[in-house]
Image (cartoon, grey):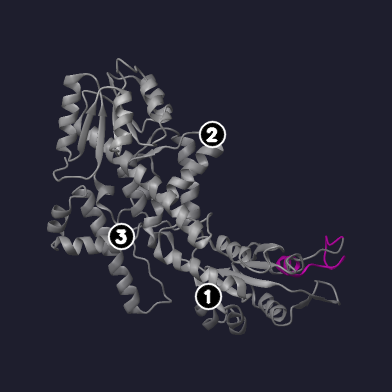
Amino acid sequence: MQDEPRGERILLLDDADLAAQRVRRLLVRLGFQVQVTATVREALALIDEVGTDAIVASLELRSDPGVSALDRLRAHGSGLPVIALTEGPSVHGAVEALHHDAADYLEKPVQPDRLERALDAALARARTERDLEAARRQVADRYGFSHMLTRSPRMLAVFDQVRAVAPTGASVLIRGETGTGKELISQAIHSRSQRKERAFVSINCGAFTETLLESELFGHERGSFTGAVGRRQGVFEMADGGTLFLDELGETSLNVQVNLLRVLEEMSFRRVGGTDSVHVDVRIVAATNVALERAVSDGAFRQDLYYRLDVFPILLPPLRERPEDIPLLMRHFLDDAGREYDKDPPIVTQDAMACILAHRWPGNVRQLRALCERWVITHAGRRLEQDHLPPHMTGASTVGGHGALSIDERLTMGENTSRATREIERAYLHRLLGRHRGHMENTAGAAGITRRTLYTKMKQYALRAEDYRS
């Protein structure tokens, strides 16, 4: 039970005096500021006059029985989360309430822990939706990246890099783990360049054998190999005048790298099986999740090609290093999948969100998006509980998500030690905040640090007390 004041205001809509007073007392004990009204008309007037953060509404109102109260509140357009209350259990009533945009559905007499959980989840979702809209405005207005959502300072710095390099025509090398959005960044570079009216062509270099990759890159002449029934353009010709995105460049062979270097230096090449030189004007944006410096030292990647491409390096942080983006991206992906499959997105509980935030996300944003689609299909319009998450996520609250710390061999021992310390601190505070349900004084006491230090650490690791108040 919450034992310190909270800032959120709750509007209680119920015309049954005794029941209303009981729920009001529960809400006050939970630390909320509470206003009570008996009709939807009065509720709407209060919303307009003084505002509120959430509504707890009975479905047995004499003036607006059943879901008609939910419909009138929704029609008002405030978008406030509504917790529906009803007498006795009813599966049909619960489903109907959720279909009419109730954030949750509780039976009377209301259980304090259920009420607290329902409000915390509803308020957290409302905050996320506000943050999502704010992030959309920020990246669209300041950065022009309406298709990429973030609140992370590191990602916003990446956007600044894109804006700086896009008009120049310089080669760009994007590095980052699988699923971090390297192709999206390459498209953003192209769309802000002087070549934006010409073609943007991408190729995954790791998806082909050496022979097939040469044909894909440079094209081939008729009869150059079995199955070559005619002349075929490669991606360099297709991208002439535009931008060519070479993904997974670190997977190419040394022979292909020699040919790539020649093209980059001379902007000309011969098709496979051909004798004539083909001249092109192409901007190269390359990407890799391989540590190219190590590949160079191991002899697996040509040093001259590396230096030719590494004119303007951009490093994309993995999702686990920008946890403040996870709720935003989840809300965006759930809403997108809901529209695509014509289903209501699930309601993510606080326990489930805590596991999601603690997960290391080895597949990064791509993995998160895929799981959001799955959750819309399997839990449309229902609560997504911790038990509904994949086993590797519910068992991933140990440091490192899979029981191991992340180690980057490109960094020094001191840098890896500092990184490991940050991971341990964040995982430790995440667990303590969950155990003490976001209570700052108790968490600081258990950690053996001052409340000021706890605030500083939470800001550093993008942890928010309200996310644990469930």
Q: Is residue 214 above or below residue 329?
A: below
Q: Earlier in the sequence, mark 3 or mark 1?
A: 1
Q: Is residue 389 above or below residue 458?
A: above
Residue 218 visible in image: yes
Residue 399's mark? 3
* Residue 76 position in % (x across, y down): 40, 31
In this rendering, would 96 be left or right of 146?
Answer: left
Type of amino acid under label 2: Asp
Q: What secondary structure characterizes most of the magenta part?
A: loop
Q: Earlier in the sequence, mark 3 or mark 2?
A: 2
Q: Nearer the viewer, residue 318 or 132?
A: 132
Span of residues in magenta: 212-229
Q: Gap between marks 3 and 2, in whole Å? A: 38 Å
* Residue 69 position in % (x across, y down): 36, 23
In this rendering, would 450 be left or right of 273?
Answer: left
Q: Gap between marks 3 and 1, in whole Å? A: 30 Å
Q: Nearer the viewer, residue 135 or 411?
A: 135
Residue located beneath label 2 in the image: 342
Instruction: Give the foreground label among 3 and 2.
Output: 2
Q: Secondary structure at mark 2?
A: loop
Residue at (16%, 26%) from the top-left corner?
22
Based on the picture, tell me whether residue 226 belongs to the magenta stretch: yes
Q: Which quadrant holds residue 250?
A: bottom right
Q: Residue furthest front?
A: 49
Q: Gap between marks 2 and 1, in whole Å? A: 41 Å
Mark 3 crowdedness (10 Å alpha carbons): few <14, some 14-19, many ≥20: many
Residue located beneath label 1 in the image: 313
